[in-house]
Amino acid sequence: MNDAILLARAYLSRVAEPPAPALAEFVAEVGPVEAAARVRDGRVGERVAAETGVRRAVHRAEDDLAAAAAAGARLVVPEHAEWPAEAFAAFAASGSAELAPPVALWARGPVSLQALCAQAVAVVGARAATGYGAHVAAELAAGLADRGHTVVSGAAIGIDGVAHRAALAVHRPTVAVLACGVERAYPASHQLLLERIAASGLVVSEYPPGSVPARHRFLVRNRLIAGLAVGTVVVEAGLRSGAQRTANDAASLGKAVMAVPGPVTSGMSAGCHRLIREGALLVTRSEEVVEAVTPIGMHLAEPPPPGSRRPTDGLNEAAALVHDALPVRASRDTRWLALEAGVPIGAVRAALVVLERRGLVEHREGRWRRRIVEPA
Amino acid sequence: MNDAILLARAYLSRVAEPPAPALAEFVAEVGPVEAAARVRDGRVGERVAAETGVRRAVHRAEDDLAAAAAAGARLVVPEHAEWPAEAFAAFAASGSAELAPPVALWARGPVSLQALCAQAVAVVGARAATGYGAHVAAELAAGLADRGHTVVSGAAIGIDGVAHRAALAVHRPTVAVLACGVERAYPASHQLLLERIAASGLVVSEYPPGSVPARHRFLVRNRLIAGLAVGTVVVEAGLRSGAQRTANDAASLGKAVMAVPGPVTSGMSAGCHRLIREGALLVTRSEEVVEAVTPIGMHLAEPPPPGSRRPTDGLNEAAALVHDALPVRASRDTRWLALEAGVPIGAVRAALVVLERRGLVEHREGRWRRRIVEPA
């Protein structure tokens, strides 16, 4: 990892309150190092300035990285293999300002975020869970974890805590996404639970060390729970609840939205019933969740014969268009690519993430070029 | 009412075990009087013979009508204004042999079946209902009845009985569809309930007086519950239940299918959850049921200006095609109409029911002609 990139993203992680869509776009265009330098100096457009003006003089990147290290945490950045690029490609593709991707993630735990989230499922729900909801959350989370689907949740009391504990009980790592610094024990009663999560799985946050769990951060955090997972299950939720926000974010990100029904006489199931009426899939057990998040034919498809495999096989349409548009001998920025490929700029960014992970493109200072790759 | 038609349909009601699709088709083509005469003499095709051969020598039409009258019941036939022609048009349109319409209905009670069923909703469910299911069924049925939607059900113990009682408790008529003669008290423990239903609403059956509730008749009967209503709500149902059959029949008839969720830990809600996963609308209270069965804009639409109203306004496509195809000076049978209008024969029959109710067509001996109607 390039230290300059790490320091730049650590600085950017503190400089703007998430979600910061203009900053995310700016970083994607000019790269993190140049973006950090220009934010620091105020050489940015109006929208980026609005997001970064207040804190741009706060230079604590080295301190934050040191504080994280002292707490056993690290900074995970998009330039790193550990970045959950495929899961997060949905952020750029969503085109929603509310769903801006994080500039980096602080992570505490011994495993790769990317590896843990490849088939992760978010299990979320009400703090004021009923005994029924807690029972179902435990059954679902245990069943999912046991089938190799990492349980992602928000470490709150109620459904979240039950889901994490059920995954740990079957000896599977689980991911807690916090609305404060990863070294904090919040809620305080979950101090031991968070330690156990970080011992085998991950505690992650987009807020730098020391950040406090301000009220609005819980809602903003929910987009990361939805974003890290391939699908979200709401176990219990009142009509106004954070879990519904997570479900809405998952839907906007194009991910599977599922909800568990309950008695119509229970206010804690009212949010789930509304979600189902609005199109969420009703699920009653973990097998149904697995079925919903497993791509059709995933277990059935034969791999293609070796001779026919090309590096561009299996790309989605936008990625194929962007790849075709990119020159080999010259580099281009995302705006040029959007115009040339006829693909919306958000989808261009998502496509570039996928192409870069496959080693098909490379970038330097915010400009992209195609890499020459021999067929396998 | 023409006595010959009544006697003919009373005879046909006993001669074939429902559902009798070939007989229903035959009666629609040649009319009930000729159909009865030819069935009696065995002058019928192979399919009708298969349905009527065993009992065609049973001549009890007059006795059955007398027995019905003695029990305070009457025979309702398609030629009568009381026939629920619009609700039952779905049978012909379904094209399914299992969903053959009844040749007649025996009815006990002081009100018109057609009037009661114009906005009826079927509320059905498990015999082995839980306290939760009984509570929800009572709330739903009372709410529907109170809003003028007749509750139709099967008078069984469990959900059915609760639904009927809840309607009676808010002083609204309710319709019980039996799998035996309308003079029978089945189940025996519902003798008083059936008397109360017949006092203000209707007890109906396609089985002539004295018929016993044989096992298969409960499933066959369920199509009439679905057919009389504009939509069906399943409150509780196991994975193998008659209520699911009613829901499937409602779906095949193109009517609204709704189900009430419950705890995923309850086997009595498992059938409802499966129905919702397969496309039924999740409903939690009577307002949601009313919304689902009320045509969009029904309360909002302005009537068209008087000058523009024509007798054929608002006909569906099949009815308009059949109407256009029908000559004024000559009469044609349904097969000719199907060929000429390019409409499936089942849909032709459904269209003719609608057209006849509007006074746009008339028939004689199984042949149809257009009536001349002046614009309003």
Image: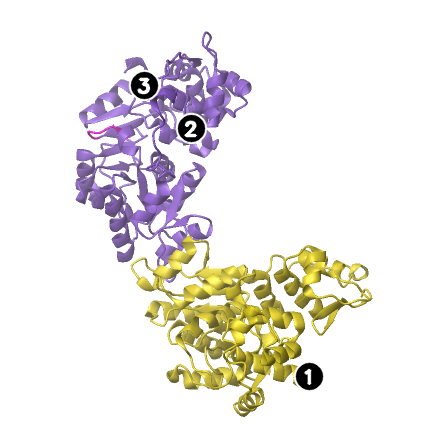
Chain colours: A purple, B yellow
Disc number lying in front (2 or 1): 1
Using the image, tell me which numbered label, if any, was put on residue A38: none
Query: Can the viewer see residue B360 in this picture?
Result: no
For the view shown, which residue lies furthest in the top direction?
A329
* Prevailing SS of the magenta stretch: loop
Q: Position of residue B250 (x, y in %)?
A: 50, 63
In front: label 3 or label 2: 2
Q: In the visual, does B77 lie left or right of A367?
A: right
- Could you tell me how far apart the alpha carbons at marks 1 and 3 are, in whole angstroms? 97 Å
| Residue segment shown in magenta | A109-113
Q: Residue at x 34, y 34 (%)?
A: A228
**The quadrant where residue B73 appears:** bottom right
The amino acid type, in three-letter code, at marker 3 is His
Residue receiving disc 1: B2
Q: In which quarter of the view is residue B30 placed?
A: bottom right
SS at badge 2: loop
- Horizontal and vertical percent position of residue B330: 80, 66
| Residue with the mark numbered 2 | A20
